[in-house]
Amino acid sequence: MKKKINVNLDFMKLIFKKSINYKSKLTMTSKFESVPGWDSLGHMKIISIIEKHLNISFEIDEIVGVNTVKKLIDMTRKKMR
Amino acid sequence: MKNLIKFREINIADAKLILKWRIKKRISNYQFTDIENSVKKQINWIKKCKQKKDYAHWVIMFKEKPIGFININSISKKNKSASWAWYIGSDKYVFLGGFVLPYFYNWVFNCLKLKKLNSFVFLKNKNVIKIHEIHGYRSYKKKYLIKKNKIKNYYIKMTLFRKDWKFDKYKKCVTKFSTNKNLKY
């Protein structure tokens, strides 16, 4: 049986580590400006790893407004419903 | 879903904003030329651009706010090719850099019917090289040298061929690139 993945802060910590090698403190309110590596390329990598991990696909209009960890989690949860 | 990203043709009223972006260190570092901090000269540049037949430029808009600049240049009817450049000027929206481009590529390949799009990138601009590779660009091995402020910089040519563009993945990224020029051949 396929294991259900909980999309929460811990999940995002894993995603950030895998995509942009970010291992420091990450909170729900972390914004792209405060996370080194979360730039134009970093954003593409983060989204790509989430998509691969959960086998989902985001539309660009869903992605573009997402600039905090909380928004990333909300967007991903919405997509999984 | 309504497009959050749009492209508006540049006019003289944008001169001050574009200049403010263009002289930022993080942007000018990767440009082939440095420009003076002069609104007057920027206005003249916009006026000159209006006369060019193989050139057009737009302000990148996000949620109706200007966030960046994009142009297409050296459009060749014979080769069905062009070059282009872009940057996100607003620091708040730098992370959107890679996501505005599929709209441009769809327009270039679907509306202008070009077969290839060239981008000249400084070797030190690793992020852009990587973003281009993700979008399907091919790199040429040859390295070109340019001296800017007595500092040597190497740059390469990268090309996105129509046949390599991921039309299916980005099929929904369609928006208008309004211009008074007749760029279609």
Image (cartoon, helix red, strand yellow):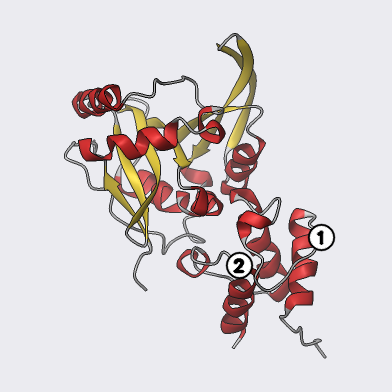
Q: Amino acid at mark 1?
A: Ser
| x then y, percent, for residue A2 | 80, 87
Q: Residue at x 74, y 54 (%)?
A: A20
In which quadrant of the rendered image does the N terminus of chain A lie? bottom right
Q: Secondary structure at mark 2?
A: loop
Identify which residue, A19 or A26, lies in the foreground. Answer: A26
Residue A24 numbered mark, or none: 1
Query: Are labels 2 and 1 on one chain?
Result: yes
- Return the chain for callout 1: A
Say above or below: B3 vs B102.
Answer: below
In the image, taking residue B18 as reference, residue A42 lies left or right, namely right
Q: Would you call the spot at circle 1 few (<14 residues within 10 Å), some (14-19), or many (20 or more)? A: few
| x then y, percent, for residue A39 | 62, 50
Say above or below: A9 vs A68.
Answer: below
Q: On the image, numbered disc 2 is attached to which residue?
A: A68
- Return the chain for callout 2: A
